[in-house]
Amino acid sequence: MSSVVVILVVLILVLVFKRTFSSFIYSLAIVDIFLRLLHFIKLNVVNAELGSILSRYFPTSLFDLVNNYTSGIFHLILTWFLVIAYIVFEYYIVCTFFRKK
């Protein structure tokens, strides 16, 4: 449950200081990429203590967070929200890539 609180605090702080939709999408993607990097480190580091700390306090991704703490229709809505947010993030990345010729 502590991982949910930390991630929600980070996302709320981003919304308070940067009130645009694009900053929310970017922060969502940044948090997910960070969680996936921590998961990669957990799998590839032989230090058992560090691996147990990462397993205890950090989920593998935002999808894992949704799977662990929700169920039913709310789970379905949050999962589709994440999919749509990732599609919007891809759109922003592609637009930025083609603008920077």
Image (cartoon, helix red, strand yellow):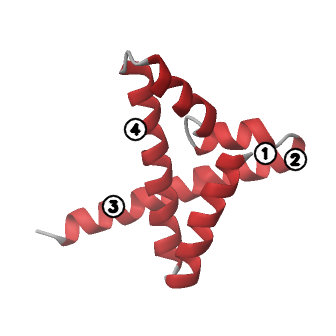
Asked if residue 92 lies left or right of residue 58, the reply is left
Camera-nearest residue between 95 and 70: 70
Residue that badge 4 annotates: 37
Residue that badge 1 annotates: 76
Nearer mark to the viewer, of 2 and 4: 4
Q: Give residue 5's quadrant in the image.
A: bottom right
Where residue 16 appears, as percent x and y from the top left, is 58, 82
Q: Give residue 92's quadrant in the image.
A: bottom left
Of all residues, the one furthest to the right in this rendering is 72
Residue that badge 2 annotates: 73
Asked if residue 20 lies left or right of residue 7, the reply is left
Nearer mark to the viewer, of 4 and 3: 4
Q: Which residue is drawn at 45% across and 60% down?
A: 89
Say which label, 4 or 3, has the lower sequence index. Answer: 4
Q: How many angstroms separate mark 2 from mark 3 (CA)? A: 30 Å
Q: Are marks 2 and 1 in contact (CB under 8 Å)?
A: yes
Residue 93 numbered tag: 3
Q: How many angstroms separate mark 1 from mark 4 (CA)? A: 25 Å
Where residue 17 appears, as percent x and y from the top left, is 51, 83
Asked if residue 21 lies left or right of residue 12, the reply is left
